[in-house]
Image (cartoon, rainbow, N blue to C red):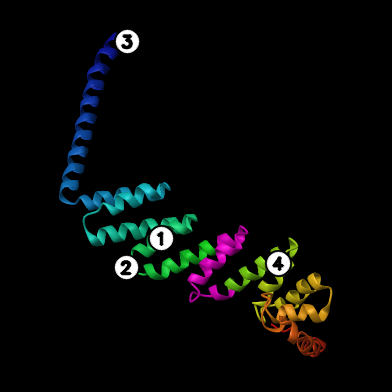
Amino acid sequence: MADKKRKSEPEFIRGTVLASILLLLIFIAAGVVFARNPDAVRGAAVRTLSSLGNFSAAAELAGDMDGDEARAQSLYHVAGKMLSAGSFEDAAELFRSLGEYSDSAEKYLEAEYAYADALYNSGSYEQAMEVFSAISVYGDAAERQKACVYAMAAEAYEGGEYLRASTLFAGLSSYEDAQERAFDAALRITGDADAAAVIVSSGGKGGGYCDAAQLPAARAACRGQLSHGVYPR
């Protein structure tokens, strides 16, 4: 047993020395690679950090790259990982900063749309409406903007804010049953169909037909429209 122990000790020392030499060679090789192409090393680190979900560190490291192409490529990679991970707002900002690189402009719109959709699903209708409005040219964003207003109006109605609800519904024109709901909300305020129609026709702002001298004529006009199922804006 003693002989085996004596024999194993030199082998252990020899193995440790070899491992140390190998590790040293790896560090030297890495240093040579970094000296020759530091962006390649940083790029690999950016990809690793992005895969681990450390997006802020990855973006910072990518931004420190020397080459324009390498920097843009790495930032694009980080933005893509952010988008996949659901960090829509940060992804949109990063894609926007990349300007015309690759399809960054299209990816920016995609990220903003996803951000607005997430806001809508969380009940932040007004904020979602603002984001959809800013990208109204993308997909069905313009229609989704109307959906946000409709949801805001419905929320106001449920909360007893009937004037606000009527105003918001009335502004949606022919979207779904918005005009019918605008009239219903106004009716809850006035208790009178003609007066409710006047509120809807004025958009709930008190202008137009709400002038006292014109009110009888407005009611007559509204009565005719209501009899045909038309709810004026």
Front one among 77 and 33: 77
Q: Position of residue 117 (x, y in %)?
A: 56, 64
Question: How far is disc 3 from disc 4 in space, using C-alphas?
Answer: 86 Å
Identify which amino acid the numbered label 3 is placed on.
Answer: Met
Question: Which numbered disc flags the more N-terminal residue, 1 or 4?
Answer: 1
SS category of the residue bearing label 4 = helix
From the image, tell me which residue sits under label 2. 101
Q: Position of residue 201 (x, y in %)?
A: 70, 82
Q: Residue at x 79, y 79 (%)?
A: 195
Q: Residue 193 falls in which quadrant of the image?
A: bottom right
Question: How far is disc 4 from disc 2 in space, using C-alphas?
Answer: 42 Å
Identify which amino acid the numbered label 1 is placed on.
Answer: Glu
Nearer to us of marks 3 and 1 is: 1
From the image, tell me which residue sits under label 1. 93
Residue 128: in magenta span: yes
Q: Is residue 156 above or below residue 41?
A: below
Which range of residues does the magenta coloring cover? 117-143
Q: Position of residue 76 (x, y in %)?
A: 35, 60
Question: Which numbered disc flags the more N-terminal residue, 4 or 2?
Answer: 2
From the image, tell me which residue sits under label 3. 1
Question: Which numbered disc flags the more N-terminal residue, 3 or 4?
Answer: 3
Residue 162: in magenta span: no
SS category of the residue bearing label 1 = helix
Question: How far is disc 1 from disc 4 in space, using C-alphas?
Answer: 32 Å
From the image, tell me which residue sits under label 4. 154
